[in-house]
Image (spheres, rainbow, N blue to C red):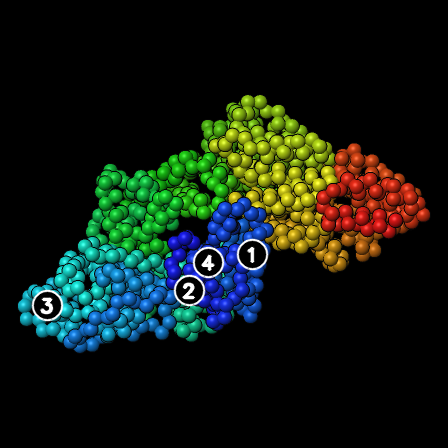
Amino acid sequence: MTTTASRAKDGLSFGPFCLAAGERLLTREGAPVELGSRALEILIVLTSAPNEVVSKKDLMSRVWPDVVVEEGSLRFQMTGLRKALGDGKDGARYIATLPGRGYCFVAPVLRSSGPHDEAPFIAVGFPHANLPNRLSRMVGRDDDVLKLSAQLNASRFVTIVGAGGVGKTTVAIAVGHHLIDAFYGAVLFVDLGMIGDPGLVTTAVASMLGLTVQTEDATPNLIAYLRNKRILLILDNCEHLLDAVAPLAASMVDAASQVHILATSREALRVEGEHIYRLDALAYPPDEPGLTAAIVQTFPATQLFVERAVAGGARLDVSDAEALLIASICRKLDGVALSIELAARRVESYGLHQTAALLDQRLTLLWLGSRIAPPRQQTLQATLDWSFGLLTDLERVVLRRLAVFVGHFTLDAALEVVTSATLDRSTVLGAVDSLVAKSMVATRPVGAMIRYRLLDTTRAYVLEIRIDDTEAADLAVRHAAYFRRWLEQTGMEWPRLATGEERAPHFAAVNNVRAALQWCFSDRGNADIGIGLVTAAAPVFLAMSLLPECHHWSERAILAFDKAALGGLDEMHLQATLGVSFMFMRGGRQRARVALERSLAIAEERGDPLDRVRLLGPLNMFHLRTGNFVTALEFARRCSATAGLEDSVAIALAHSILGISLHLRGDLAAARVELEAALDRGPRSQRTTTIYLGFEGKILARAILARNLWLQGHPDQAVTHARQAVDEAAAMDHSLTLAIALIWAISVFLWTGDLESAEAYIDMLIALAESHSMTPYLLVGRGYKSEVAIRRGDAKGGVESLQACLQKLHAAPYELLTTPLNLSLVRGLSTIGQVDEATALIDESLGLVEKNGDQLYLPELLRMKGSLLQSRRNRDEAAAYLMEALELSRSQHARAWELRTAIDMTTLMAGRGEINSARELLQPVAAHFVEGLNTADVKAAEHLLATLR
């Protein structure tokens, strides 16, 4: 990513705007735009890396390099910047927000270079320019053309290197047209793809110049002719004639100082003076949630697909759903221009959905392209045949073996997996280097290491080439064994990585784990190897929030155990991951409990204290989710009392689960002690609680502490901790942890009356739960949505949807939040006049609380019962319930419940004419609140006191 300090002085433009970073000036159609210095710096940072996500942390560190600021400052500046740009008005789209990741500048950006300083040479005696016509519109390559033009002007000899079909010839022709005036028409295009004999290379160039060739070696005459001429030679498609092209190009550059050469090849010519310009595939949208049609169509690959499909006669109304399908196709084709054009031509015949389906079933290498294209580019098959034919026998063997990898792989992985009795490491290393040079294997820096990969088109082609069954099995075994070792070495490391960018290499390697698992449990596979691989992979799947995969492979491996393996540590680990993943996906069904209890039994017999903590924590969570709060507290106390714990994260886990159990029990003072202990920074551990619970326990502790603080009468501190919990979870890029943080944080904003924040977090929770198969959390999110609807005036609709959600939660079963959702339903029922139903639900809830033990809500239930009785004018009975609620809230030290109850009791007393007594009751309760003065309950108390004065 380009740094702010290293930005070029050249200007750039987008939409009607021009940005001169060096002058710190933004103009719109020539008129200056008023913009603060911070907002301008944000714009400069984002436009320096268009279509790349800039994290909030990175953005704040670069815009406020010497100041510690809150995220609210960034949001404030971003709002001002979007307003200045008119972002979102009349279809304009400049800055996209990717929840949990950061911001991305999505508008097309054009960069402009300054004029050349040198006066052009005159081309004497040049007959004509023979450039092919340029495309009427070239997608996504403007920046490449500008960079190549500048590089050619500076260094005179540039080779565009890239894979077949990536667009090297198209870009070279565009560069020729861009520079034709600078060379006064002296631009010569030589297509070497038409030549098979290396001895004809010089003859071809000379004849294109109109020279008469009368000797076998035309090089001296060619050099003599070019010596005093300024000319741009484009030598296209050099890879099959390297031995002839390389010395000729070197001689021309050395002897003719005004000759500039632009070559295209799948590998470098490797001669002195050559500068390499590696042409990457077109950028395509990432595989991430939240993509819209507007965002998808800002990427060059998708733009090319849509344009070529429409040009081919297809009718595309690119909705959000269709845009996601187009993005998927472009990812499947790795952004390779030729592949995209061939696929786009099929849309008119097959339709978009069928075209995508055909690509998923098999990359259709034989789809026809343009009739006027060179034969090698008329199908993907022909392009790959051409490339494969240029390889040595050794390179073909190594390429076939490399096709076992899915996506990116490291050099270490390639050496471990590809090496065999017939291929030693040095031979493989040399072959990989050669394949990279020939653009058959792509490279990409990730962190401090280079990652390698075969494009999907290349891999599909290579996999069609059959190899011996024994060799294929040996290769698959080495592949699975390597990634089992990788999981065992890195499984503990990656959950501690703070950002998605740091985890990217690990996510890439997991694709290979999946492929290895598929082979292990296939008809030709090896289930014993598969069991070991699942044992290493399941905790990583759990920690990555890949719950369906964790559940599927854990169950598959357990079913493959023989009798001798039952009751061992492998079964203990797999039963644990099976139980935890099933619990979070499907709620508190007995299947999850059976798996967890089986795992605990093995841990108590054969495991160590850390293993027992690993099981006691999830069992605590299971009983919380099923509404058995008394049993959950027992497991939490057992976990806290487990001896022999030295791991700081395990200790934090014990504090966290005991804290939430005490909190729900209504023991707020003890809960706060445990929750704050969980947040204390201990020594760095090699583990995180994602290994035990599937989510980060410290973030759970912070979210519960936020609720605890609100109940204890500290609304502002509660809001701060709630937001911090969500921000920390989002920064982890860990979906399950984020969902848990949101569930508990939302309750704080509902309690304080901040419905806008609550709604924003509810929408985030629903989207997250839908995309990650977390059904209970999806239902809770919809339940919260119903509560907001009730508060905003749609009581009837809110009641109906909330009743439906509760019914499904009971069926799950997921009873962790039954009582607070029942309280919301009571409010809605009473609002629409169904007081009898509301009263019956309160009585039912009171009975469940007494039975299950979530006594935290008991004061609020009693208050609501009193309010319902007061609405029926049963004032004496209502006063009795309210006084009981007051006493209980005071015994819990729950000042928030106490304030609500005091407001209701004061209203009742004032209605009786007991004004002084009413004021004396409410005044001291309200006086405890020295913060949160704008929250709903505090404002209600102040208003009521004002009326009593």
Residue 580 in the image: state x and y as whole percent.
56, 38
- Looking at the image, residue 818 sits to the left or right of residue 899; the answer is left
Q: Amino acid at mark 4?
A: Ile
Query: For the residues marked 1 and 4, what is the alpha-carbon distance in whole angstroms?
Result: 13 Å
Q: Are marks 2 and 1 in contact (CB under 8 Å)?
A: no
Q: Is residue 163 above or below residue 401?
A: below
Residue 542 can be seen, yes or no: yes
Lower sequence index among marks 3 and 4? 4
Residue 91 in the image: state x and y as whole percent.
54, 68
User: Which circle, 3 or 4, is nearer the viewer?
Assistant: 4
Q: Amino acid at mark 3?
A: Ala
Q: Which mark is residue 77?
A: 1
Residue 156 in the image: state x and y as whole percent.
23, 62
Query: For the residues marked 3 and 2, what is the alpha-carbon distance in whole angstroms?
Result: 43 Å
Label 1: element kind? helix
Q: Which residue is mark 4?
A: 44
